[in-house]
Amino acid sequence: RGITRIARGYTLKLLAMPYYGHSYSFIERIRYYAFSYNAFPAVIESKKVLLSPNYKGNELKIPGQEPLTDSIILVEESFFNVYKVGQDETTRVLRNSIIQLGNFRKDYKGEIYLKLRPNQLIESSIWVKSLENEKIPYTVMTNDVILEYVLSMSNHCLLMGTVSSLLYYGSLFGHRSISNYGIINIDRITPFDNMEFYWDKVEKLSRKKNTQKRNC
């Protein structure tokens, strides 16, 4: 890995720089350009510059999914691998998530979709095994789908995942976002524990034992 970084031009100074964009907000000349004040939530508004692009006369063509209504979207992400959550715990969390999903079906009666990570193979999905074990029908979105764009055109959808930015953006677009982060038994504190701006928009699943019959 070290040789690869050297080949790409990385230096020790570069690697020592803070990872998060808001870490540079104390620098006077630094500005943050965005289409909405919702961007860069950890940065004060006076540091943000809103852009108003002129799309008049232009046509934006994005391939993929048609707009959705009353649909449920399960979001695949790498949290369980990155934080080394064990297989048994991962299975427990996803099964619990799917069982609780039945509580929302009366309000979201559309199709259930699975959004994989870019270039991810379905065989490596952590959701698929749980869905199939519970015999729940689902449709996998193609990899070229830009879900943020689909959500901006869709109506009354429910997103479920862990800590994906898609949950946050889904909420900004007027949809409901649910996270199973709160029911994961993990023996360390993560950056997401204190990310208040995120949890202001994304709901957490309850830890209470669910005894209702699954109805997905």
Image (spheres, rainbow, N blue to C red):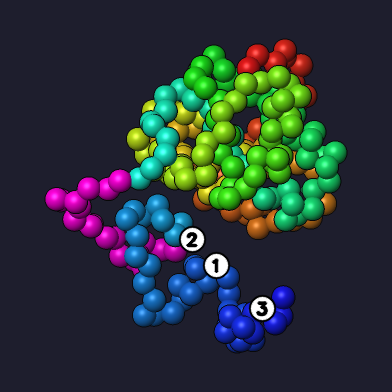
Magenta-colored span: 43-61
Q: Is residue 111 above or below residue 200?
A: above
Q: Which residue is mark 1?
A: 20
Mark nearest the camera among 3 and 1 is 3
Query: Residue 4 occupies which quadrant of the picture?
Result: bottom right
Labelled pair 1, 2 in contact (Cβ < 8 Å): yes
Vertical position of residue 87 compared to residue 69: above or below = below
Alpha carbon separation for disc pair 1 and 2: 10 Å
Frontmost residue, 88 versus 48: 88
Taking the magenta stretch, the answer to whether it contains residue 59 is yes
Secondary structure of the residue carrying tag 3 is: helix
* Mark sitting earlier along the chain (1/2): 1
- Percent position (x, y) of residue 170? 46, 40
Secondary element type, mark 2: loop
**Direction from residue 73 to residue 98 in the image, left or right:** right
> Residue type at mark 1?
Tyr
For the residues labelled 3 and 2, the Cα–Cα distance comes to 32 Å
Residue furthest to the left: 57
Circle 1 SS class: loop
Neighbours of disc 3 within 10 Å: few (<14), some (14-19), many (20+): few
Q: Residue 4: which disc? A: 3
Name the residue rendered at 64%, 79% in the picture.
Answer: 5
Check the picture and name the quadrant holding the N terminus.
Answer: bottom right
Question: What residue type is disc 2 on?
Answer: Ala
Q: Nearer the viewer, mark 3 or mark 2?
A: 3
Residue 198 drawn at (x, y percent): 54, 48
Q: Earlier in the sequence, mark 3 or mark 1?
A: 3
Q: Label 2 near label 3: C-beta < 8 Å?
A: no
Q: CA distance from mark 3 to mark 1?
A: 23 Å
Q: Is residue 96 among what the camera can see?
A: no
Identify the mark at residue 42; answer none if there is no mark: 2
